[in-house]
Amino acid sequence: MHINALHYITTNPEAAELACQGGVRWVQLRVKNQPHAVWKQLALDTQAVCRRYGATLLINDNPRLAQEIGADGVHVGAADMPPEEARAMLGASFIIGGTANTFADVQRLAAAGVDYVGLGPFRFTSTKEKLSPILGLSGYAEIMRQCRAAGITVPVVGIGGITLGDVKSLLTTGLSGVAVSGAIDKATDPSEEASLFISELSAIKAI
């Protein structure tokens, strides 16, 4: 399965629209503490945006909603439904991603058959309430080295406070891509920032 090098995480369809205008084709909708009806409407509206741009839509933390609206996949955090359960519920064609902070986490998720792993955080990020220990560049380098040694080939994406200037050094560790939210949302021109990320990732991957 092809995993995009740029994963964009958002809370609303309006931001997804701007990111997709800039070339984003992988959107993860992360909604917290909202009633089901509100969450579902946000998901449907974001799905409509993704369909217009031919983008992949993943729902964070809610496999049932992903199934209900026919999203492309789901991302499950450490405290959410185990990926094996999500796979049994959603079937083989759904994309399932998982969250990792350590090599042991990556190992467990790879064994569970996830399609990709979100590994982080790279640095402090205000978008997460309960932050796991920060990895930094050396943390990624070490975990990716362990993955290679163990023959683990699942795509690993860096996440957590990543900016455009971090992309090159992060990809040299062996990561398949990066997941960003604030770096695009807080930019003066989110669409332009998204296209800069894509250009940078494409240039590095082409080397």
Image (cartoon, rainbow, N blue to C red):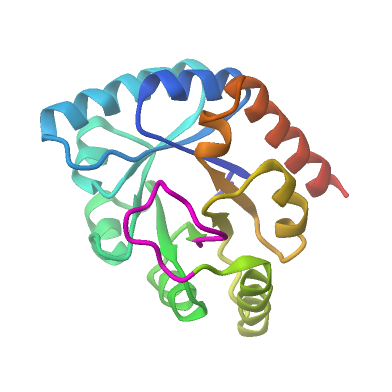
The spot of residue 12 in percent (x, y) is 35, 26
In the picture, measured across the screen, residue 185 lies left or right of residue 199, that is: left
Q: How many marks?
A: 0
Q: Can you give x and y, in whole percent of width and height, for residue 98 in the image?
A: 40, 60
Left or right: 102, with 13 as reference point: right
Q: Is residue 76 above or below residue 42?
A: below
Q: For residue 78, what is the image quadrant?
A: bottom left
- Looking at the picture, does residue 73 appear above or below residue 40? below
Which residue is the extreme one toward the right? 207
Q: Main secondary structure of the magenta part?
A: loop
Bounds of the magenta span? 119-133
Q: In front: 56, or 201?
A: 201
In this orientation, which residue lies closer to the viewer: 89 or 118?
Answer: 118
Q: Tell me the quarter of the picture where residue 47 sits.
A: top left
Apparent side of residue 92 relative to residue 146 in the rendered image (left or right): left
Which residue shows up at 47% across the image and 15% down it? 52
* Magenta highlight on residue 129: yes
Q: Is 72 placed above or below 178 here?
A: above
Q: Quadrant of residue 31?
A: top left
Residue depicted at x 58% and y 57%: 158
Q: Position of residue 131 (x, y in %)?
A: 39, 62
Question: Which of these two is toward me, 115 or 40?
Answer: 40
> What residue is shown at x 30% (from left), y 52% (from top)?
91
Q: Magenta stretch containing residue 127, yes or no? A: yes
Query: Residue 92: x and y, percent?
Result: 37, 53
Q: Which residue appears at 41% of the width and 67% of the height?
A: 132
